[in-house]
Image: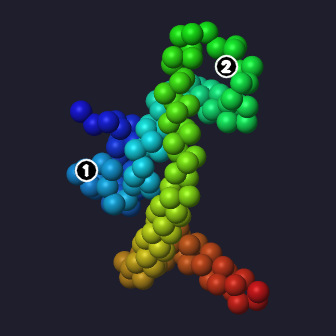
Amino acid sequence: MNAYPNLSHPSQRWCGINYGVVCPNFPCKHTECTDPDWLEACEEAIEKPEEHERAWHIYLALAKDPFSIVKKQLRPEELALYKPRVERYHRIMTNYPKIKQELRESWARQQLQTMEDEDELLNDESLRGDPDVEALREEKIKASLRRVKL
C-alpha cells in the first residue's frame, strides 16, 4: 500500500506529464519535495482539502499565540484530530528553508525539461506547418525579442 495514493497517481506526477510513463517508485527524482511531512500535507490537501485548510488556520493561530482562543473553541475530539496536523505543520515550518530550496531546484528542473521538450517539438520536421507548433514558435520569438529590448 502506497503512503501517498493521491500524490503517486500518474495525473499528479511530473515524470509522466510529457510521455505518460511514470517512475516505478514514489517519491521519485521528479517529486517536487521529498520531505515526509510536506508529502503528507500535500496528500491531505488533495484528499481532505477542508480539513487541511482548517488545520493550517489552527496552526497559524496557535503559532501567533499558543494560548489562542482557537484552542478553547475546539471540542476535545477536534483537538485530537488536529493536534498531529498542527505538529506536522510546525515541523514543515521549522524545515521550510530546506523544503523551499528543494522546491526551487525541482521547479528549475521542470522548467528546463519543458524548454528542452519545446525545442525538440519546434525542431521536429514532421510538425512543420502545424498551427499549434507555429504559434509556439512565434511566441518564443516574441519572448526572445522582448528580452533583447530590455
Of mark 2 and mark 1, the one earlier in the sequence is 1
Dot 1: within a 10 Å radius of its alpha carbon, few (fewer than 14), some, or many (20 or more) residues? Answer: few
Residue that badge 1 annotates:
25
Q: Are marks 2 and 1 in contact (CB under 8 Å)?
A: no
Q: Quadrant of the C terminus?
A: bottom right
Position above or below: 132 against 55: below
- Name the secondary structure under disc 2: helix
Numbered badge on residue 71: 2
Q: At which x and y percent is residue 43?
A: 44, 37
Position above or below: 111 against 14: below
Residue that protrudes farthest toward the bottom in the picture: 148
Residue 115 vs residue 142, the one in the foreground: 115
What distance separates the C-alpha of mark 2 from that of mark 1? 39 Å
Q: Is residue 150 left or right of residue 17?
A: right
Residue 39 visible in the snapshot: yes
The number of numbered discs placed on residues in the rendered structure image is 2
Looking at the rendered structure, the kind of residue marked 2 is Lys
Which residue is found at the position 75% from the left and 19% from the top?
69
- Which label sits in the foreground, 2 or 1? 2
Position above or below: 109 against 21: below
- Name the secondary structure under disc 1: loop
Looking at the rendered structure, the kind of residue marked 1 is Asn
Residue 105 vs residue 46, the one in the foreground: 105
Dot 2: within a 10 Å radius of its alpha carbon, few (fewer than 14), some, or many (20 or more) residues? Answer: some
Which residue is found at the position 56% from the left and 39% from the top?
90
Q: At which x and y percent is residue 64?
A: 73, 36
Which residue is found at the position 24% from the left and 33% from the top?
1
Which residue is found at the position 58% from the left and 72% from the top?
135
Q: At which x and y percent is residue 74?
A: 64, 14
Q: At which x and y percent is residue 62?
A: 68, 30
